Image (spheres, rainbow, N blue to C red):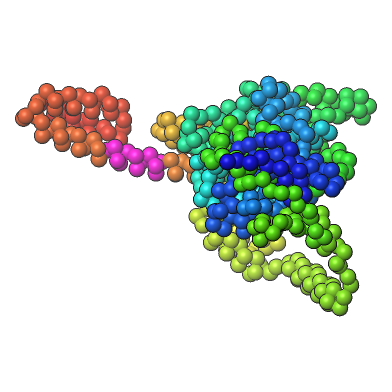
Amino acid sequence: MNLELKQLGPYTIGETLGKGGMGTVYAGVHQTTGQRVAVKVLNPQFAVAEGFRERFETEIESLKKLHHESIVQLYGYGQQQCVLFYSMELVDGPSLEDELHAGRRFGWREVTEIAIDVSKALKHAHDHGIIHRDLKPANLLLAKNGRVKLSDFGIARLFGATQLTYAGGLLGTAEFMSPEQADGRAVNDRCDQYSLGGVLYTLLAAKPPFRARSMPEMLQLQRFAHPEPIGRLAPDTPQELQRIVTQLMAKDPAERFANTGVVARQLEAMLHALSRPLDQDFATGDISAVRHDVPISLAETIDAGPPASPARPSGADMAADHPGVDPAASPSAADPPDGDPSSAGSPQAAAVDEDGRQKTDQNAPHDDHFILLEDQRRRAESSQHWTLSAVLQTLGLVAALLAIVLGIWYFSLPQSADALYQSISEAAARAEPQPPVAAEGELRQFLRRFPEDQRAARVAALLEDVEIDQLERRLRTYERSAAADERLTSAERLYLDAMSLAESDPPQAIAQLTALANLYGPLAVEPSSPDADARRNERCARLAQRQLDRLSAKYEQQNARARQELEEKISQARDLLTTNPERARSMFQAIIDLYGDEPWAADLVKQARAELKR
């Protein structure tokens, strides 16, 4: 018989705010302070899972480090009668998912401001070694002051570490899951960038990047497909914002941003550039930015700096469920398989002692407890005092800082040619067979300082490989960008045209790449003063030659397999000449019809024609 839940720790439990497969969220009121909070009670099945309690407390210890104005604050956590629960900030506002379901359309400026807040919150978490892993509109809450707050930190890792799933569902929302998560590969902070890109795409386009009829189909789309360009669905979206979203959703994590702090700075610079008043532009004589619908290069706005934002109080973070926000209560998750967490019983009211732990009835389990983080911090601060140990620690810290300064000074000394070349060689060996992109700075330094060294030629060749690799990555990004035409040289446009045929018409692609390499390749006599576009065209020709070698090898392998199959068919047809001549003639004719125009099959087609004449 399920009893009504009345009390957990120092909180009087009120109405149910949300319910899902991982647990139930209730409104709660602190008995002493009257503070209103949200209390999440995990399903009893998790409390009995092997090792789950230890992971629960370990994850809480990690999340206690987070103090950010855009992250929902964690207040406390505990256990009562085999029920694990935690309390957190109650956000009186809807989630972005609620707003989308209600038909709300978000303008690009509002989306940019949301993205800035979320990027800074993620940067704060990533700096503390915490990855969200389940970023989606349902986990972004709109507070009354307009601030977006990010919830449900740590939930994906906590439940992903156990064999339990909620209602058999896959942890993480597949609509916003990064390709590396869909592949089951190890993830880092850049998986949150991909999910952030999916959220921004959804807010701008009023629909998620991909739709699928099944989970395997959705995971396949996340791994290999590219969404429809945002500009077609939201034409007023600035091209710079489209580029940022495209880079966030790059399939290769290495092609995304270095970190979300860079994302926030680029968004702030873009917003600042596109928001300059008309009067200011006319007053300064700058008319290049008068039309706000024309994208402005970030390079023009970096010096101006992003607009200052008012300081706000910050708090600790925790995954905060809210009405309609619980990840398991979203449309992609199922209801809990076994009843309500309240079935664990109706805990009696309990006071909190001076150590922040709950005083329980003698009949209660001996491990019932509740820890209030504010009390914990207050005790830690009051217990601090200056002792000999503290002095020794301070001296040790000073010595460590001095060692760091000396180390920085030592390693900042210019390297010799031998040492620098050794470092380059080791980087090249680690990156093999790819170019040593990480050693680009050392490559340029070597050529600048030691141009007469006999090893300079090999270093220059390595640098050329690095630059061609970077060009290939950049052009691969432009394949998905509708705003790339004005930034490309003639050779780069021809290269993209040829590569678009690589799968559908390899011979034509090979022919175009060959012509491109011949037309724009390096000359026997260098021009006296080549301009920047000429140098870019020559580098693109080198890239075309690299792709030509790869594509030709692949095409030859495919042709070799096809020839082998065709030879087997001719042999089969010859065997049928005596027993089933009609079938044999039809096979010879089919070979002529299908491969008559293929140069690589000319001799086999000739054999088929000869057999027909016989």
Image point 30% across, 41% down: which residue? 560
Image point 94% across, 27% down: which residue? 283
Q: Which of 417 and 530 is in front in this view?
A: 417
Residue, far left: 578
Image point 54% across, 57% down: which residue? 50
Q: Give the left or right position of residue 204, taking residue 594 as reference.
A: right
Image point 54% across, 41% down: which residue? 338
Q: Is residue 186 visible to the viewer in this orientation of the structure?
A: no
Q: Which of 158 and 365 is in front in this view?
A: 365
Tell me residue 447's x, y (percent): 66, 58
Is 389 located above or below residue 340 in the figure? Answer: below
Magenta segment, which residues?
552-563
Q: Is residue 562 visible to the viewer in this orientation of the structure?
A: yes
Which quadrant: the N terminus? top right
Task: Determine the image quadrant of residue 420.
Answer: bottom right
Q: Give the left or right position of residue 61, taking residue 492 as reference.
A: right
Residue, far right: 283
Q: Please tell me whether the stretch drawn in magenta is mainly helix, strand or loop.
A: helix
On whether residue 530 falls in the magenta region, the answer is no
